[in-house]
Amino acid sequence: MLTLSYWGFDNAVHSGRLVVNASAVSPLTTAFGKLFALRFPIERMAPIDAYGGDDDASVAADNTSAFNCRPPDGGSGWSQHAYGLAVDVNPLRNPYVHADGSVKLSVSRPWVDRSQQAPGMIHSGDPVVQAFASVGWSWGGSWTGARDYQHFSANGH
């Protein structure tokens, strides 16, 4: 259980928790420390248990989370989240977008237009992507085909 301070959209400091693999503690502490220094806003940060393990409910609440024992979207086997080696940041504002442009959850539709520059959104090359890249984690927004703008992982998947 990793406990982190983060800036909320209310401009106040909050304390959040992420369940992660032990090998992810140091890189995530560093990356989220950089996000804190940037005052990058995060809506909420709670373990998936707060949503009964329901990824869709967590996304709809714009909850930043890590561990979730589930298969990958559109794939088989286990997601990197099942190993505690991936984190989703502000997943409502940074949706999973299928190759055809549709979104996993319709509530995310307003956030598909990545030309928007709204607080909490993540864009290619921005300081959020750089913070995770500095610890060797890759961003799902740079994938070809489907794009997962919320997703950062240790192995790029």
Image (spheres, rainbow, N blue to C red):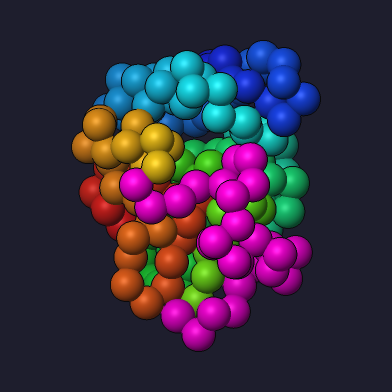
Vertical placement of 45 versus 111: above or below?
Answer: above
How many numbered circles are shown? 0
> Which image quadrant: the C terminus?
bottom left
Across and down, in percent, residue 140 comes to 38, 57
Q: Is residue 26 magenta?
A: no
Q: Is residue 79 left or right of residue 70?
A: left
Overall secondary structure of the magenta stretch?
loop
Q: Residue pushed farthest bottom?
A: 100
Vertical placement of 99 versus 52: above or below?
Answer: below
Which of the pair 45/95 is nearer the observer? 95
Which of the pair 124/50 is nearer the observer? 124
Across and down, in percent, residue 2 comes to 48, 20
Which region of the structure is painted magenta? 99-125
Residue in the image at 42% along x and 31% along y: 20
Vertical placement of 2 versus 96: above or below?
Answer: above
Residue in the image at 32% along x and 37% along y: 130
Q: Is residue 145 left or right of residue 2?
A: left
